[in-house]
Image (spheres, rainbow, N blue to C red):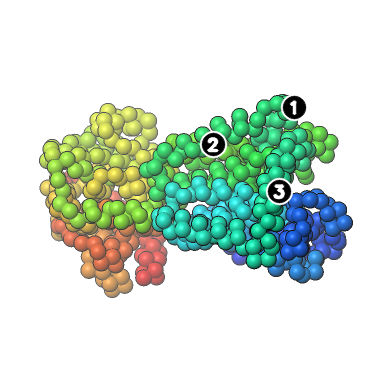
Amino acid sequence: MASQFINLKSRLLNPYVVFAVWMLCTVWICITQSLAGPQNYNNFLVFRGVFDHLFSSLPLYEPYPLEYGDINHYGPIFAFIIAPFAVLPPWLGMSLWCMSLSLLLYWTVRQLPMPVVLTSLVLWLTLNDFYGACFKQQFNIAVAALVVGALAMIEKRREGWAALFIVIGTFVKIYGIVGLAFFFFVRRKGRFIGYMALWSAMALLLPLLFVSPEYLWSQYAAWAADIVQKNGENMFCAYTNISLVGCVRKISGSPAYSDLLIIVPAMVLFLLSYLRTGQYKHFSYRLTMLASLLLFIVLFSSGSEHSGYVIAALGMGIWWVNFPPPPARGRLEWTLLLLALFASFSYNLLPTKFYRGVFVAYALRSLPFFAIWLHCIRRLWREDFAVTDVLLDYKTLPAADEAANEAAESRPARPGDGLDIVCPCYNPAPGFVPALARSYAELCARYPDKRLHLIVVNDGSPHGFGEEQHGALRQAVPDVEIVDIPHGGKGAAIRAGIARSRAPYTIYTDIDMPYTAESMCEVIDRVFAGTDVVIAVRNRSYHSRLSPMRKMMSYGSKLLNRIFLNIRHTDTQGGLKGLSPRARAVMLRTRISDFLFDTEFVVLAARDKRLRIEEVETMLRDGIVMSAMSPRVLFRELRNFFRIAIRL
């Protein structure tokens, strides 16, 4: 049963399956709406009218009952966006418009530098609200896509495209201006500002090629007046203001107060998260910021409609996938997700009378999304996203941080410099705390002029590392940093510890510190001397303690490394290595979560010609016993080896 569920899950998250479902929904909407006639795609007729009226120099914000119902609320530049669709027959233009919106949202979500399965899950969680918005040809789909696309392009260092997406969203529907919240994540800020100025000038002045300045300025003034008027009309409207501000307004029944009483405190809560500048470099932090922005657009706007919840649903999806693997999601997170999904499907699940008379009338749909937004804010304030980046295989260090580290990667250590010692553990042996404390104290005594810091990563140990061991370790080593993560393997644990390292130098070794103090000090001394990567090479005394099977595996791995990987440093599995800041960045790019992460790291480091790599022959302490390796583990590591070889 479990294997069948896993198989179904993998199929549902297959990008080809997701794309097929996404496009089938869009095609179905295009066919049914075209057959139903113009009365079913009134919104597209409104959009089409913007094109006709602008190029005829007619008012854009007045009713045209002979052409369509409702009134246009989009900026003058929208005429150029809708132009390719407006010149076609209405049914064909509407169909291509819906198809374009669909593909734009799908493409921008896929552009986020996330694992494919995560973007697939985001699209599944957004699908129902996307269907509702596409059914009404709503530009809200494009708003969601433009905000997501802005961050995706910033991540790819395509500042021109990011600025263009923000400008389009702003000059069409104002909402796009929230994309400026990503400004602090832009690495080439001058380039970004220049593109913003260029695209803004073009968006503002492009209509002047076809209309007079007097007409254009009058329409911008009319647009501003229309926004103010629409805000007042939305106050108690049943099918707009479906937001948190609308919920409070409709429950209170009072028109006397300003929505700013709710919006300003919310903005303050959001802006306070920018104080955590050290988290900017973590992609999971930036994704959480994106999720909170998408939710903010809907929750704190009086113009929010049911179709606008495609924006909030996208934010919910990004919030959900941006958790580390279980058990990071608890009952609270699952409850919030289920309530938000229930709200999305409420039209089908609730009795019609209750749905219209209570759920819609009091904008209750906003409440679960507001709770998710608060959860995002809490994470932005408190969570250390370094570990989240590692567990979700996100790239942690942008190029700007790598450049900042280059000045420190090869300099010799000075008095007062720090060294982080990362020790992963999984089901440690009884009594490991006193032994670890003694070994750590001995190293500290050998380097009185340096600041040593111990980072212990508990790799989801079901045994041997409970509250008692946590307390004992903190008592034995008061400044120890304990990182608890779900079980992911030794490689995942090492990366989680490396991500927490802030000292100029780092070493990692096993929790029992199996090498002699002299061997460890030699590795540390080489790192302090400015070597980027110091590899502990096991001497003959090490191999003499191995069983014949383990000995054959050890020599065999060296032979495979030389033949298939073509690396000079073939003894990659010593379990003790020293790293400079630049080498730490390379370690965080590894993907193997089992024991062969060491080999993957050495391969990546050897390909970086800037790194200086040295070997140190090391010796085991007396009393160290090598554990046995099961055939299952051996097969898994062999598979990992060929994964590394194929990537080359």
In this view, 139 is above or below 253: below
Residue occupied by mark 2: 267
Q: Position of residue 12 (x, y in %)?
A: 62, 58
Residue 252 or residue 573, whichever sits in front? 252
Q: Position of residue 158 (x, y in %)?
A: 47, 61
Residue 51 or residue 590, whichever sits in front? 51
In the rendered structure, the answer to whether residue 387 lies left or right of residue 364 reads left
Q: Position of residue 153 (x, y in %)?
A: 50, 59
Q: Residue furthest bottom?
A: 563
Q: Earlier in the sequence, mark 3 or mark 1?
A: 3
Question: Marks 2 and 3, how far apart in space?
Answer: 28 Å
Q: Earlier in the sequence, mark 2 or mark 3?
A: 3
Residue 192 or residue 561, whichever sits in front? 192
What amino acid type is highlighted by mark number 3? Ala
Residue occupied by mark 1: 253
Q: Residue furthest right?
A: 66
In this view, 568 is above or below 429: below
Q: Position of residue 262 (x, y in %)?
A: 61, 31
Residue 125 or residue 594, whichever sits in front? 125
In the rendered structure, the answer to whether residue 388 lies left or right of residue 321 reads left
**Residue 143 visible in the displayed image:** yes
Query: Which secondary structure, mark 2?
Result: helix
Q: Residue at x 86, y 53 (%)?
A: 65
The answer to whether mark 1 and mark 2 are in CB contact below 8 A is no
| Label 1 CA crowd tier, 10 Å (few <14, some 14–19, many 20+) | few
The answer to whether mark 3 and mark 1 are in CB contact below 8 A is no
Q: Which mark is residue 222?
A: 3
What amino acid type is highlighted by mark number 1? Gly
Q: Earlier in the sequence, mark 1 or mark 2?
A: 1
Q: Nearer the viewer, mark 3 or mark 1?
A: 3
Question: Which part of the image, by quadrant, shows the C terminus?
Answer: bottom left
What amino acid type is highlighted by mark number 2? Met
